[in-house]
Amino acid sequence: MVNGKAIVRERVEKIDGVSRTWFEWLSRDSTMSKTLVVEIEFDTDPNNSRFRQSVIDEIYETVDAVLKDETTMTVSHLRIVPKGST
């Protein structure tokens, strides 16, 4: 963690098309799960002309690699949302 952010967030925020990231917590049956939310600068509808599948793929690959190889952090879910939808 540098500058108070988890390394997975730092890496994902460097991807072109990502505006910001944060964690959300969900409590279910006395268990807490952590979701990494990634806000992107384009529509998530694949039929939209601004949709960028390559960015979606890069986000997933980056999160997967960082969590496997660079940290002991556990993230239960990855959520990708278009800017302004939160």
Image (cartoon, helix red, strand yellow):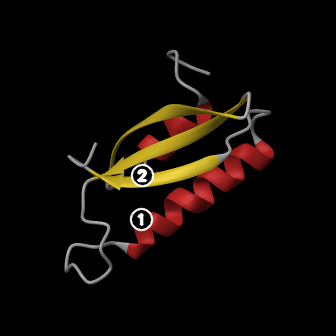
The residue positioned farthest toward the front in the image shown: 29
Above/below status of 43 relative to 34: below
Q: Amino acid at mark 2?
A: Ile
Residue 36 placement: quadrant = top right
Q: Secondary structure at mark 1?
A: helix
Q: Earlier in the sequence, mark 2 or mark 1?
A: 2
Residue under the image location 32 percent in, 55 percent down? 17
Residue located farthest toward the bottom when viewing the structure as drawn: 47
- Vertical placement of residue 7 versus 45, above or below: above
Please tell me which residue lies in front, 30 or 76: 30
Q: Position of residue 77 (x, y in %)?
A: 61, 49
Q: Name the residue located 51 percent from the left edge and 57 percent from the top edge.
A: 59
Which residue, given by chain and number where applicable, does mark 1 sit on?
Answer: 55
Residue 3 lies, in percent from the top left, at 50, 16
* Badge 2: residue crowd in 10 Å (few <14, some 14–19, many ≥20): some
- Dot 1 amino acid type: Val
> Is 67 left or right of 8, judged from the image as shown?
right
- Residue of label 2: 15
Image quarter hosting the C terminus: top left
Q: Residues within 10 Å of mark 1 (few under 14, many from 20)?
A: some
Q: Quadrant of the N terminus?
A: top right
Residue 20: x and y in percent read 36, 39
Using the numbered discs, state the Cα–Cα distance from disc 2 to disc 1 in whole angstroms: 7 Å
Q: Where's residue 27, x and y in %?
A: 63, 31
Relative to 60, is 13 on the left or the right?
left
Whether residues under marks 2 and 1 lie with C-beta atoms below 8 angstroms apart, the answer is yes
Secondary element type, mark 2:
loop
The residue under the point 51% across, 63% down is 58
